[in-house]
């Protein structure tokens, strides 16, 4: 694909290509355009399935698309092969410093998943997402439940139609999403 300044350089390049062939890692420069993160990630999201082999739910798919267009936007036009562990570390560090550690953890988990699929597809040799614990990042904010007295004040002063919701949340230890999805049948 290029002209070499010496015969030694040309032989070295040819030797590297032979090694790639023997290892099964060679790709034709004519037919193999480098995969770009943005389109590849969107395709990954559309074709991904959950642990039971079912397609992702629309809300999950929408959240992943939001992450690709938001925190992962830096990688939008990057060829997959140009995303290095150092680049991922710098990106994650900046995301974590922004104060949105939970979102950074979710974005990192998606990035790692997309790049793991790229490894499986043979588009990159290894996954550059190697930060231990980055997927499990939490805000670090300590949540303290109200005291019994504070709880009584909340129940007494809230609109009566929400009083039972407050009771179930307080004594059941439910998160907001779990609480709002409860139905009479539950």
Image (cartoon, grey):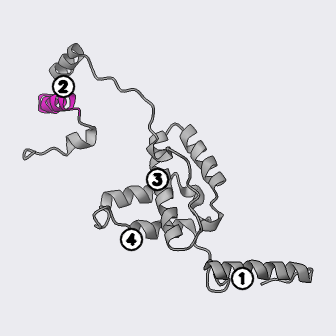
Please report whichever mark, 1 or 2, sits nearer to the chain's N-terminal start: 1
Vertical comparison of 95 with 23: above or below: above
Residue at 44% from the left image edge and 43% from the top image edge: 136
Please report whichever mark, 3 or 4, sits nearer to the chain's N-terminal start: 4
The CA distance from mark 1 to mark 2 is: 74 Å
Judging by the rendered image, the residue that carries numbered circle 2 is: 158
Please report whichever mark, 4 or 1, sits nearer to the chain's N-terminal start: 1
| Label 4 close to label 2 by CB (< 8 Å) | no
Q: For this view, does 2 lie left or right of residue 45?
A: right
Judging by the rendered image, the residue that carries numbered circle 4 is: 47
Q: Mark number for residue 94?
A: none
Q: Mark number for residue 18?
A: 1
Residue 152: % across, % down: 17, 17
- Mark 4 neighbour density, 10 Å: few (under 14) some (14–19) many (20 or more): few
Judging by the rendered image, the residue that carries numbered circle 3 is: 109
| Secondary element at tag 2 | loop
Residue 26: % across, % down: 65, 80
Please report whichever mark, 1 or 3, sits nearer to the chain's N-terminal start: 1
Q: Quadrant of residue 140?
A: top left
* Residue nearest the observer in this picture, 173 or 129: 129
Residue at 62% from the left image edge and 64% from the top image edge: 78
Q: Quadrant of residue 141?
A: top left
- Mark 2 neighbour density, 10 Å: few (under 14) some (14–19) many (20 or more): few
């Amino acid at each position: 694909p290029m002209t070499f300044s010496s015969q030694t350089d040309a032989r070295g390049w040819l030797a590297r290509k032979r090694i790639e062939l023997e290892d099964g890692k060679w790709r034709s420069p004519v037919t193999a355009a480098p995969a770009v993160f943005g389109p590849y990630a969107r395709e990954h999201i559309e074709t991904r399935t959950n642990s039971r082999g079912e397609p992702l739910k629309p809300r999950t798919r929408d959240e992943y698309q939001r992450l690709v267009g938001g925190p992962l936007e830096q990688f939008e036009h990057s060829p997959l092969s140009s995303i290095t562990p150092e680049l991922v570390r710098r990106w994650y560090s900046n995301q974590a410093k922004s104060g949105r550690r939970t979102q950074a953890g979710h974005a990192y988990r998606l990035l790692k998943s997309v790049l793991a699929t790229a490894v499986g597809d043979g588009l990159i040799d290894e996954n550059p997402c190697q930060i231990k614990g980055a997927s499990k990042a939490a805000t670090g904010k300590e949540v303290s439940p109200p005291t019994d007295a504070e709880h009584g004040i909340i129940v007494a002063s809230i609109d009566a139609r929400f009083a039972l919701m407050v009771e179930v949340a307080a004594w059941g230890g439910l998160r907001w999403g779990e609480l709002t999805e409860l139905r009479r049948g539950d």
